[in-house]
Amino acid sequence: MQQRLRRLLFQAGYSGEDVESIVYKLLVAADFNVEAAERGIIYIDEVDKLAKQVGCQEDWRDVSGEGVQQALLKIFEGTVINVPRKRSRDSTSDGYVEVDTKNILFICGGAFSDLGKIISERHRRSPFGFGTPLCRELRDHALTNALVESSLLHDIENDDLIAYGLTPEFIGRLPITVGLTHLTEDQLVQVLREPKNAIGKQYKKLFKMNNVKLHITENALRLIAKKAAARETGARGLRSIMEGILTEAMFEVIPDAGEGKEKIIAVLVDEESVGPVSQRGCGAKIFRDDGALELYIYQNNIRVPGLIHGPKHNVIFSFCLIVVLSAAKLWVYHTFHCFSSVYAWIVLILSKANIFTQ
């Protein structure tokens, strides 16, 4: 059973959630089974927000930063915590239960923005002086910045985390440090298309509620993934890009069409709709007439899953039809010698039908 704690932790005695509340959430997820909770896993996200505050004075208490790190030390090391059994609406507890955190696996994660700069300064790779990207080169530099920073995270050391703002005692309780790489374009395309609740499938279902078909080309998906990679927003940035492309169609064009104006048949998102990496596209393309989408796809030779493509599709289909007819002809001649005339008649009918359809 998994539960995610999305609350801001504070040092004990201050307003907000205490550090011990994470163990209580684990106990709730285990249905108050203490033995199961003592062998559980706790994942604490956004640990980078617990770094020391730069502008915090010595006589002030950093209750949401260094104070929380100090409070987590005893839990990480292993101790017995009194956790309330149940909490009612008036915040009263029904007794307490002891939970030993010695065998609980603690995993901490975070974005740790600008940590790559600290690592590059340690390696003396900071782009100052000669070699600094010029203004015209900053556009290409932004595309590879995420990949370069993710490669630097493989060389992370404890001194880098201390310079970032984490205390040495806190880092000492976490013996294994791993830097994760940023998502590539192929992985971002998978997020858009393959999962059960993929972003592309969600928008298609929303358009289907208004009896409108949404089609997204393969090149458009690649360009959306490239934009998200350039902005360094990861998978969460894919939705904002899709919203910018489909906002006009979803909230302006389609509702107006439902009030008695021209009916909308389909919406297409191609490369022009997405636009270049550094610019905004023209938005989704609207099609109101039957066959207008198919005609546009045929004229521009665009590949859209589920629709008829350009002339290459017809050539492949004709070639496969010739192969099947030839195999059928050989089988008929070797098996049924008397039906050779019937086969010639069938071939003649099919050829006439093909000429008629063209």
Image (cartoon, rainbow, N blue to C red):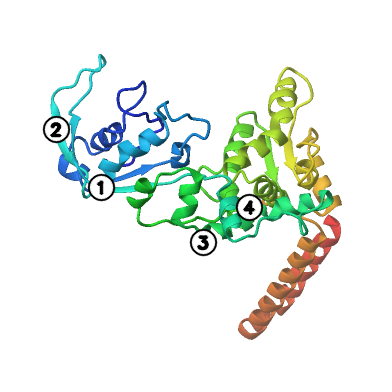
Tags 2 and 3 touching, CB below 8 Å = no
Q: Which mark is residue 219?
A: none
Cβ atoms under marks 4 and 1 closer than 8 Å: no
- Residue 338's x, y, as percent? 67, 81
Percent from the top left, x then y, of residue 225?
66, 49
Q: Residues within 10 Å of mark 1 (few under 14, many from 20)?
A: some
The mark total stands at 4
Q: Residue at x 50, y 55 (%)?
A: 180
Nearest to viewer (mark 2 / mark 1):
1
CA–CA distance in space, label 2 to label 1: 19 Å
| Image quadrant assignment for residue 150 | bottom right
Q: Which residue is mark 3?
A: 155
Q: CA distance from mark 4 to mark 2?
A: 46 Å
Query: Which residue type carries mark 3?
Result: Asp
Residue type beneath disc 2? Val
Q: Is residue 184 visible?
A: no
Where, by quadrant of the figure, is residue 310 drawn? bottom right
Q: Residue under circle 2?
A: 97
Of helix, strand and loop, which one carries label 4? helix
Disc 4 target residue: 146
